[in-house]
Image: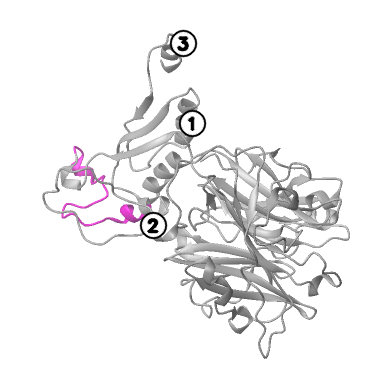
């Protein structure tokens, strides 16, 4: 019908799905069905959602199916309290007969990336437009809301000066501050980074409310937590919403992680655990004289994927189910490779582009001038093949030749970092409007032992955004 209407010029803008499900929730191909209709050039909406007995997983799966289709523009639950429902005997809604939130309410909220509100629905709800769940404003970067724009094929940036530098103390003689990971939560920026010196690597944490305060923020050395001493580097932090737990992923010679229920408590991290029992065979067979580095975790609605590099031209990917995470990573394969190892070197980071079916991959390369820079690719799924976006020295994602330095050129390297995200959960979603990238750079004249180089942290802001 939609194809026929479109062919005959009949105006049709949206297709609604009533979605009155049984206890099993949506069929396994529900997301595909939504996507197939959207591909015909119409929006889709779930217009009459209720699920018998309101299973938490079924509600969560329904919400995720919509969120994973860029043209799914709305979800309407068909009633407020179970007593209001046309299927009252099946208790299919998000609030019980007294107006109390049911577990399914929280599963919907978590799937949307939000946090719980308090209170109950009044016995006689006012006749106003409302929503059952909203995204927590405190978990998003403080930028004005804007519709996501398509990723451009080329980029230009403006860099801050040095925002964060090492802070040595009586037990830490630090040469470089490196490999930052950043989230915005409860009104504060939370930054995790490597601290490097000739004697080795470990991790540091700092937080602040505004970038102007970054240089004065206290440095909390995580070797004083259960993370412990020894080689720990290249952190990545995110909130794993299904477990309501923060994860800190880093390299120890293996792919390791620690967990915490409070990101602002530097002493709350658990001792390191490993994702793998040992280096996967395919990495061992291809690593050559390189190093297994820079682990990165990202999840979609069904699976979690762990990416890593080998300084030898290979990007690896393993996967497990969302329910098994952090265990069960298998099926390790080469997700991308380049015969020039310096062109696909290390520091991969992968993101979901908000309100699209697109993923963005960034990988650090070493250019013909010996300077670090980033190349980029896109794919329609985390398990898909990657197509070049801005992936050359002449058209890079971020390199000294497309970055301006209003405060003075303090670095010619645009090295290991992370995009500022639109939220903080395991989907690693970014808003494509006016991207920002926290990165490491160094004095262009610095040389010598890599571990002793004077890396510092700065912030790129996209200057050619279309929105």
> Could you say which disc has been placed on residue 130 in the image?
none
- Quick one: 75 or 270, which is closer to the camera? 75
Q: Position of residue 459 (x, y in %)?
A: 61, 60
Q: Main secondary structure of the magenta part?
A: loop
Secondary structure type for disc 3: helix
The residue beneath circle 2 is 137
Whichever of labels 1 and 3 marks the residue nearer the N terminus, that label is: 3
On screen, 32 above or below 325? above
Is residue 429 a member of the stretch shown in magenta? no
Callout 3: 10 Å neighbours few (<14), some, many (20+)? few
Q: CA distance from mark 2 to mark 3?
A: 42 Å
- Quick one: 401 or 13, which is closer to the camera? 401
Write the residue at 58% across / 67% down. 248
Q: CA distance from mark 1 to mark 3?
A: 19 Å
Q: Which residues are magenta?
A: 86-107
Callout 1: 10 Å neighbours few (<14), some, many (20+)? many
User: Which residue reaches farthest top?
Assistant: 8
Is residue 102 a member of the stretch shown in magenta? yes
Whichever of labels 2 and 3 marks the residue nearer the N terminus, that label is: 3
* Nearest to viewer (mark 2 / mark 3): 2
The residue beneath circle 3 is 7
Q: Is residue 236 visible?
A: no
Callout 2: 10 Å neighbours few (<14), some, many (20+)? some
Residue 58 relative to residue 90: left or right: right
């Amino acid at each position: 019908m939609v194809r026929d209407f479109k062919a005959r010029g009949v105006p049709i803008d949206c297709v609604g799905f009533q979605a009155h499900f049984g206890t099993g929730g949506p069929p396994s191909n529900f997301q595909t069905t939504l996507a197939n209709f959207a591909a015909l050039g119409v929006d889709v909406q779930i217009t009459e959602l209720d699920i018998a007995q309101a299973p938490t997983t079924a509600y969560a799966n329904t919400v995720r199916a919509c969120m994973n289709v860029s043209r799914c523009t709305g979800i309407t639950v068909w009633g407020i309290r179970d007593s209001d429902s046309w299927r009252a005997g099946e208790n299919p809604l998000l609030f019980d007969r007294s107006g109390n939130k049911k577990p399914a309410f929280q599963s919907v909220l978590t799937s949307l990336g939000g946090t719980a509100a308090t209170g109950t629905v009044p016995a006689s709800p006012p006749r106003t437009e409302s929503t059952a769940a909203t995204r927590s404003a405190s978990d998003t970067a403080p930028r004005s809301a804007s519709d996501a724009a398509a990723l451009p094929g080329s980029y230009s940036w403006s860099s801050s000066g040095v925002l964060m530098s090492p802070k040595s103390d009586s037990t830490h003689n630090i040469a470089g501050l490196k490999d930052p990971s950043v989230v915005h939560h409860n009104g504060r920026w939370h930054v995790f980074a490597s601290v490097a010196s000739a004697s080795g690597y470990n991790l540091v944490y700092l937080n602040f409310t505004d970038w102007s305060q970054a240089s004065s923020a206290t440095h909390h050395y995580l070797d004083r937590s259960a993370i412990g001493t020894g080689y720990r580097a290249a952190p990545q932090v995110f909130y794993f919403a299904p477990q309501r737990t923060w994860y800190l992923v880093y390299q120890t010679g293996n792919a390791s992680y620690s967990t915490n229920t409070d990101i602002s408590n530097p002493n709350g991290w658990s001792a390191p655990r490993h994702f793998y029992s040992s280096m996967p065979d395919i990495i061992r067979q291809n690593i050559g004289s390189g190093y297994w580095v820079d682990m990165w975790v990202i999840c979609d609605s069904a699976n979690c994927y762990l990416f890593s590099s080998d300084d030898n031209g290979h990007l690896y990917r393993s996967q497990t189910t969302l329910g098994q995470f952090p265990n069960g990573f298998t099926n390790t394969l080469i997700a991308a490779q380049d015969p020039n190892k310096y062109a696909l070197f290390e520091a991969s980071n992968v993101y979901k582009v908000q309100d699209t079916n697109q993923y963005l991959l960034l990988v650090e390369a070493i250019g013909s001038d010996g300077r670090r820079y980033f190349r980029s690719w896109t794919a329609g799924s985390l398990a898909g093949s990657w197509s070049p976006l801005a992936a050359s020295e002449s058209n890079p994602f971020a390199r000294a030749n497309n970055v301006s330095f209003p405060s003075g050129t303090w670095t010619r390297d645009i090295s290991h970092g992370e995009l500022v995200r639109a939220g903080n959960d395991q989907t690693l979603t970014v808003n494509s409007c006016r991207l920002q990238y926290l990165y490491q750079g160094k004095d262009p004249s610095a040389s010598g032992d890599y571990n002793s180089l004077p890396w510092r942290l700065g912030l790129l802001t996209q200057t050619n955004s279309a929105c």
